[in-house]
Amino acid sequence: MLNSPAECLLGVDSGGTFTDFVLFANGKVRIHKVLSTPQQPEQAILQGIAELDLKADGLSIVHGTTVATNAALEGKGARTVMIQNEGFADLLNIGRQARKSLYKLQPENEPPLTPAHLCLQVDTRLAANVELLKALSDGDLQRLRQQIKALKPQAVAINLLYSWLDDSAERLIGAQMPESVFVCRSSEVLPQIREYERGVATWLNAWLGPLVAQYLQKLQAQLPAARLSVMQSSGETLAARQAEHKAVHLLLSGPAGGLQGARHVCAKVSESRLLSFDMGGTSTDVAIIEGRPRLSNEGFIGRYPVAVPMLEMHTIGAGGGSIARVDAGGMLLLGPQSAGADPGPACYAQGGQQATVTDAHVYLGRLPADAALGGSLKLQPQAARKVIETLAQQLQGTPQAAAEGILALANEHMLAALRKIALQAGVDQRDYTLVSFGGAGGLHWECCLLSRDAP
């Protein structure tokens, strides 16, 4: 066990398939990898620290987490009440009236962000010049307390007009909430103009907050003597105790660390114009870096607009664990569904029964049969062969062609993502250096070569 934890800096990235560790100690770098534990992410972190033979006392940990991201994409937030001004109960559901498909006559109905019974209104009003037009009465506050008691929410989001100029009404309402409820005020989460964007950010923070806070509290309880900081979507770090209350700022926590790492490494060789290509087990993230990563306050996570500062990147559901399948017309499809960490690709021998990108690499010998991922996870080539052969039968082709088809399709998805961000930025990607990283990035060198000549 290392005797000088004060000299140690540990980077931890919890992904959908693997949890990765980079340890800098005594001037040397060590890397380690364990399978993620999605139901209890802190368990994989504790396992990795133990396997690295580290003492937690005084250890400095910088953590990129996907807890908020996964909960948002899977729709697994807390029961949240939204409190707004009288007449604004439907604000988040109306939004900007933007349509995904402008000319689609029969668009699919999406569930509202906040169900009607969880939208509460208060009869108070502040003018744009901060003149108080109508104050909250004791009766309003008493009625609000009764409604909250009846609804029994886990979290409450408060979003009042012009609260970014005067937050006294939001503070007064927040003080009425039970101590057991996670309370978020828009004047604290995103103190800026535009009530819709501010409202969505506040709702997201409240909706995800209890899950993030519970996770970080568990992790800190297991590592009480360690100094734990968390990566934000902007690429900056935040003390874990502060991050407990800023879930909306952690939606790109994991990918943000990769961009900062790519920037740091490439600066050593005087490369500043970069296309980053981060391929993990579940997804691939691509971004443009010109000196430093670009920031945006117009990002999206799934269908949710996120107005807090976050690194500008594009994510697709293509990773080492992406599942290959055949549609009704006999066409090969890939992703966005992933085998994740449990059961994982078939070659991990954890119970996976469907062919994935990693299985294709193993079948074609691009991952050696005797390789041990992360130093400990032994591959099972026979399991990979079985699922590739099954897929080949469905395609009425050879296993070789099926495996090559999986990788070709994965590469095309990634090339499309790289072209998209280049076109949106109005740049020629041939003028940029492609930086490949992530657990599976180096395996897709064809994508790297093709992107140099892509129009």
Image (spheres, grey):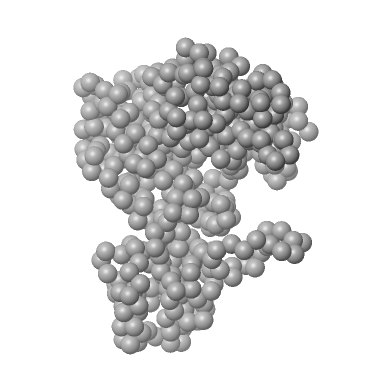
Work out whether residue 336 or residue 350 is closer to the camera in this orientation and state it. 350
Residue 240, above or below 10: below
Please identify the quarter of the rendering in which residue 362 is found: top right
Identified at 52% across, 77% down, the residue is: 88
Furthest-right residue in this view:
455
Residue 144, above or below 421: below
In the image, taking residue 219 as reference, residue 136 lies left or right, namely right
Please identify the quarter of the rendering in which residue 227 is found: top left
Identified at 27% across, 69% down, the residue is: 178
Identified at 39% across, 63% down, the residue is: 79
Visible in this render: residue 132?
Answer: no
Quadrant assignment for the C terminus? top right
Visible in this render: residue 153?
Answer: yes
Quadrant assignment for the N terminus? top left
**Residue 228 percent across, percent down from the top left:** 31, 40
Work out whether residue 37 or residue 257 is closer to the camera in this orientation and state it. 37
**Residue 82 percent across, percent down from the top left:** 43, 70
**Residue 229 percent across, percent down from the top left:** 34, 42
Identified at 63% across, 35% down, the residue is: 325
Work out whether residue 41 or residue 388 is closer to the camera in this orientation and state it. 388
**Residue 368 percent across, percent down from the top left:** 52, 13
> How many numbered marks, from 0 up?
0
